[in-house]
Amino acid sequence: MPKIQIVGRSYPQIDGMEKATGRTRFASDIKLAGMLHARVLRSPYPHARILNIDTSRAKALPGVKAVVTYADTPGIKFGPRSDDWTIFADDKVRFCGDEVAAVAAVDEDTAEEALELIRVEYEELPFVESPLEALKPGAPLVHEDHPGNVAAEFKVEAGDVDRALANSHVVCEESFYTNQTYQAYLEPMGAVADVDLAGRITLYAGNQIPSMIRVPYAKALGLTLDQVRVVLPDYGGGFGAKMETNTHLVAMLLAQKTGRPVRHFNTRHDDFIAGNPRVPMYIDIKLGADKEGVITGKEVKVIGDAGARIVYSQIIVATACYRVDSLYRFKNVRAKGITAYTNTVPTSCFRGFGNTQATFVLESAMDILAHKLGMDPAEMRVKNSIGPDSVSVHGWKINSCGLKECVEEATKMSGWAEKKAKKRPLKGIGLSCCNHVSGNRAFAREFDGGAGIVRIGRDGRISVYHGESDMGQGQKTVYAQIAAETLGVPLDWVSVMQVDTDISPWGFGSFATRGTLMGGNGVLAASKDAFIKLAQVAADMMESNVDDVVCEGGRFYVKGSPDKSLDFKEVALNATDSNHGSPVMGTGFYDPPTVLPDPKTKQGNISPAYPFGCQIAEVEVDPTTGKVTVTNFVAAHDVGRAINPMALEGQIQGGVAQGLGWTLMENMVTNKGKVANANFLDYLIPTALDMPPVEPKLIEPYEPNGPYGAKGIGEPAINPTMSAITNAIYDATGVRITELPVSPEKLLAEMEKLKGSHEG
Amino acid sequence: MKIPIEFVVNGEPQALFVKPNHTLLDVLRDDLGLLGAKKGCGEGKCGTCTVIMDGKPVNSCLILAPRADGSDIITVEGLADGEPHPMQKAFVEQGAVQCGFCTPGMIMTACALLDEKSDPSEEEIRLALSGNLCRCTGYAKIVEAVQVCAQRIQQDKGA
């Protein structure tokens, strides 16, 4: 085999210059001939019965082409994982922002004006904002068919937790709360829907799961799966939020009613109040260790807030219950998770998928135990670290694992030992580790894996088709690198095609840090298939055996004789002509060795590969204001073999920024059932001024299940950030943060309390 | 109902009739088909709509279209002069582009900064870019790209 040339090198995104010159057509840039514009009327109440909707005046407004409500839908209940959705509110609204009616008009001004002409009579109902309140007897019911507002329950147990905790030398028992945050991708959610004469809908939507969204959407509209086609344009970020949303269905329904293309994008305000923000969680933990700092047992209770309907919150709560158990050599664990309905915005995926919340809690508890034991928190992590070629308490098979190396590198880079030894007033350093997955079998139930198609045209141009989603992370570039490497051609001979469900393979999409491993393995398999087919033609042309043929830099040659070579493009031309115009088509798939967890024992193996990481934060606390400044940050991540180091660094730096924002700034505030800060003026995310230097470090153990040895990075990049910062705050002030975010007022009050207790 | 305005966009004079409630961003995107400037929030907080107006970076979503009368506008489409602008090259090469939705606005702000000050400090770069949100990159590679571009322009001047 020729030496690896393209995989492992930093390349700019293959379409980066299109983006930098403003040529990229994002989802919200799409304009179709005759396109109408839609706006949605949303509920102003968290919980109310709809007595009457009068749309007559709106319908009469010139320029309005359709006004729709629940009565105009097939009335089918649907949902990604539960049948608790309707396209518009049925007999009652369940949160402020719930869809009540929508208008399609010739322009946005007219659609907006029409909304004001719709009259809705409501009867306000008692509502419930908090999952703790929702679970109390007698609480108002969000869905009448879900008594007690329990949306889902999850239990997992392994070993003997009670005995382990009873026999522990130290136990940390603490309650934590992680708040609601907003993904804040810069392009709001939305879509353009078009319909043909046969009633088949094409949806142009910036979306992480272009194949999967078809299933609930087809059901909602009473269509068969083949009647919903999804085309995936470039789009401005997702971070977990851009999955199923009624925002798309509004456009689809209005396209059906008008027979014209309909554009519907959330305003930023609507995106805040009716997007898919992070699942808030109350997490109680008991974590024990022996004298040596070896973890004995862990018990966790999680109460998560689903909001008014389930998107993926119940799987997120389940993930928070046990994914983190594969970070250390746990033997005794027990967790119980309850997902509760409330009259608030439905919550869902946000980078980390419950493992962020759980990591914040576990890694805070680890810090508490290390201090109780007088042990170096870094040493305690290394001591308990799961290792390569091991099996976790839930049966997960860890192949590659660079966790210890991550801790070693991060501590070295940050000068950990020195800074930890020297107590500096109001300055602190904190450490946190993390694990994650590269694909989630518990999420992709029908089958697991990824597929690709590689087409080599008569001109030698290579087109790669995949079914995942590039939301900006650079997935297309990674696929191009894998194909170019496998085929032995320069990178710029490869195009990675837009996902079109009429053409592309069925892919589960980009979530669960699965794009590079699952989709990449699919593209790899298809590239190998195409290579063999073309190499056979080259072998025939060179009167050689196909097994002896290699390709390097776009030239085929027989091993050992690189001087006598054939142009790849000439071979492609020959191959197509001898097949009367049929291009060389490589197809392939990846069937990962994952095991769906047993419903009872939860034993399984949810991912073919597990990434790890260690992050260290340094902070300074202003004693007069309580303001925390992160002054330095290092992030060492086990990514398997890096395919594109620069892209990986960008993922890490971006993940840390989101984690820093969550820890210190970001909080969706709900007041009387309404999101009180639904705009970028009141909901602040980090700017260039808020970010310290973030130094990434790639740890690269070869992962046998990864394409060219690679694992994923998307979510692990944020998992440890919150606890790295809050552990640093503890180091600086002695205040243990148990609730996110850390506001200056709260921290100052806690510092005053501590001072008081010391003086007293 | 509509108001006549005349202005110059990327060097080309334009005479248009605009709705008085429309913004410069609406006019650029809907009337002139210049889709490089984006609508990320519509309230002047995200910076994705940044264009250069009479030499200064502005949030085009906050400028009512009639106010653009008589102005000189440069959008991201007007930066490339046959080949991409050095700032565009630096952004791509340094990995400062992820989803790319903030990129046009970010580049316009960065270009305006270097027009004003050819060798800004890192702090000055961060301050200048603080009105442009990016949710993907954590800003590290964006700041590097601006620094690289500034150095290259300096070197070209020196050569």
Image (spheres, coloured by chain):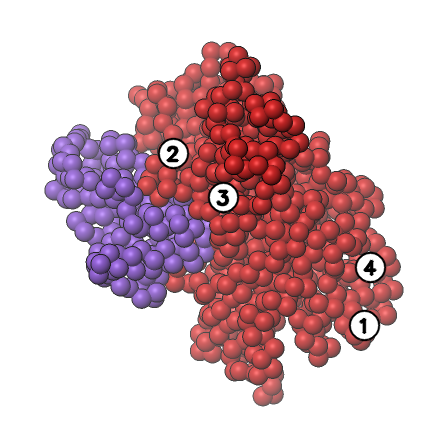
Chain colours: A red, B purple
Tag shown at residue A25: 2
Looking at the image, can residue A58 be seen?
no
Q: Which residue is mark 4?
A: A331
Numbered disc 3: secondary structure: loop
Q: Which residue is mark 3?
A: A474
Q: Label 4 sits on what residue type? A: Lys
Label 3: chain?
A: A
User: Relative to A668, is A619 above or below?
Assistant: below
In the rendered structure, are the residues bearing label 2 and label 3 in contact, judged by CB atoms less than 8 Å apart? no
Q: Label 3 sits on what residue type? A: Gly
Q: Same subunit under labels 2 and 3?
A: yes
Residue A368 image position (x, y, % from top left): 68, 72
Q: Same subunit under labels 2 and 4?
A: yes
User: Quick one: label 4, few (<14), some, or many (20+) residues within 10 Å?
Assistant: some
Task: Name the residue nearer the viewer: A303 or A18.
Answer: A18
- Label 1 or label 2, whichever comes before in sequence order: 2
Q: CA distance from mark 1 to mark 3?
A: 44 Å
In the rendered structure, are the residues bearing label 1 and label 2 in contact, judged by CB atoms less than 8 Å apart? no
